[in-house]
Amino acid sequence: MKNELIVVIGAFGSGKSEYSINLARKYNELGKKVTLVDLDVVNPYFRSRDIQDKFAEIGIEVIAPEGEFKHADLPMMSPRIMGAVQNEDSLVILDVGGDPSGCRTIARYVANIKKRGYQMHFVVNTKRPFTSDAKAINEMIDMLEFSSKLKITEMICNTNLMEFTDADVVQKGIDICEESIKERDIKFEKYLVLDSYNKIVPDGISGKKKIVLSYFLKKPWQNTVLTNSTI
């Protein structure tokens, strides 16, 4: 079976980069050859490129802007990205920014993405301004699909309030997500919980699977710590 190509997308603050990184770590631990591509030109603080060196130590290739462009909020497109999209010897995860300009960065790769076959995971935190209710989420889905020219295949609920997260917060987020896609052909089976709150939020809310994330990304004034993933 050929290796998958997974596009991860979501609005600013959704947690999609944290999810992308944990996903890469999960498949690495399963013995897969993994390439993580940072196409996020939206968020200046939380980006996959920030763990590039540490992932190299465990055999995960991270493709991201290099040198003077490493921290630039610009779509510096490496020719290595097309190579990764076309390379079916590696499982590829594309971490894409969640606004029209972010989506447009993958436009040049769409034909090859469709040719290879893909999943597109939409990460949603209903405690963020642009995805706080079903109507807003639907508008976001339409915008992301139109801009990227790809179809979302799976919704991932990441509703949280950091240290104020509890089962009720997550349940309400799941309910909103379910409402938003009730007339869409989008799979919704999982919700995310940071490992710090794992004991507070149970598995099986609304019959869905809890995925526990390790906290990889910190703000620039914090140290990045690579911890074990339990995704």
Image (cartoon, grey):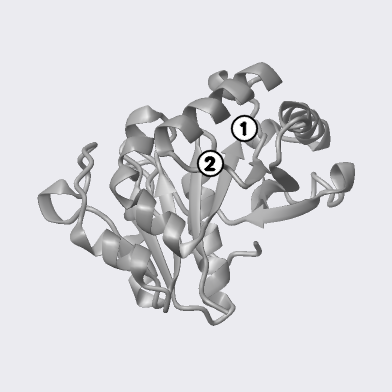
Q: Report the residue at 36% width, 72% height from top.
A: 87
Picture layout, residue 222 above or below residue 34 = above
- As helix, strand or loop, the secondary structure at mark 2 comes to loop
Q: Are dots 1 and 2 in contact, CB under 8 Å? A: yes
Q: Given the image, on which type of amino acid does mark 2 rest?
A: Gly
Q: What is the count of numbered marks? A: 2
Q: How far is disc 1 from disc 2 in space, using C-alphas?
A: 8 Å
Q: Report the residue at 28% width, 61% height from top.
A: 82
Which quadrant of the figure has residue 133?
top right
Q: Position of residue 109 (x, y in %)?
A: 33, 52
Q: Which residue is mark 1?
A: 125
- The image quadrant where one finds the N terminus is bottom right
Q: Given the image, on which type of amino acid does mark 1 rest?
A: Asn
Q: Position of residue 50 (x, y in %)?
A: 33, 53
Q: Nearer the viewer, residue 142 or 61?
A: 142
Q: Which mark is residue 15?
A: 2
Would you call the spot at circle 1 few (<14 residues within 10 Å), some (14-19), or many (20 or more)?
Answer: many
Which quadrant of the figure has residue 89?
bottom left
Asked if one can make out residue 47 in the rendered structure from this viewpoint, the answer is yes
- The image quadrant where one finds the C terminus is bottom right
Mark 1 and mark 2 lie on one chain; the one further toward the N terminus is 2
